Amino acid sequence: MPTSRTAPSTRRFRELVDRSTSFEAEDGRAAGDGDRVTMDFVGKIDGEAFEGGAGEGVTLVIGQGGFIPASRTA
């Protein structure tokens, strides 16, 4: 089990790996874990858009938990 001393090193390592990972456009299949997607979105509560809940050209790697958990099932 990593100690709190090693945890920042592990996080930094993962950040470096993520930055050095290359992605290529691929058509004809649904995105899956590890794929990078660029998306526009509008967050809504009870059908109404809320302030600060929209984005354009947002990049996300599927499966890395970059959005709130509820958005992963929508």
Image (cartoon, helix red, strand yellow):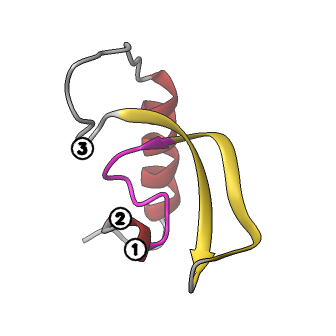
Q: What is the magenta range?
A: 60-69
Q: Residues within 10 Å of mark 2 (few under 14, many from 20)?
A: few
Q: Earlier in the sequence, mark 3 or mark 1?
A: 3
> Image check: 36 left or right of 42?
left
Which residue sits at x=59%, y=52%?
Answer: 41
Q: Classify mark 1: residues with Cα within 10 Å, few (<14), some (14-19) or many (20+).
A: few
Measured in 3D between alpha carbons, the distance from the residue under mark 2 to the one under mark 3, in whole angstroms, is 12 Å
Tell me if residue 30 comes above or below residue 74 in the rendering: above
Viewer-proximal residue among 22 and 53: 53
Hey, what amino acid is under mark 3? Asp
Percent position (x, y) of residue 51? 80, 73
**The disc labelled 2 sits on which kind of residue?**
Arg
Q: Nearer the viewer, residue 66 or 37?
A: 37
Look at mark 3 in the image and give the residue it sits on: 33
In terms of sequence position, does the residue under pointer 2 or pointer 3 come before the other? 3
Quadrant where the image shows the C terminus: bottom left
Q: Nearer the viewer, residue 13 or 55?
A: 55
Q: Position of residue 58 (x, y in %)?
A: 61, 42
**Left or right of residue 20: residue 42:** right
Residue at the spot of label 1: 69
| Element under disc 2 | helix
The residue positioned farthest toward the bottom in the image shown: 46
Q: CA distance from mark 3 to mark 1?
A: 15 Å
Residue at the image position 69 percent from the left and 58 percent from the top: 54
Q: Which residue is mark 2?
A: 72
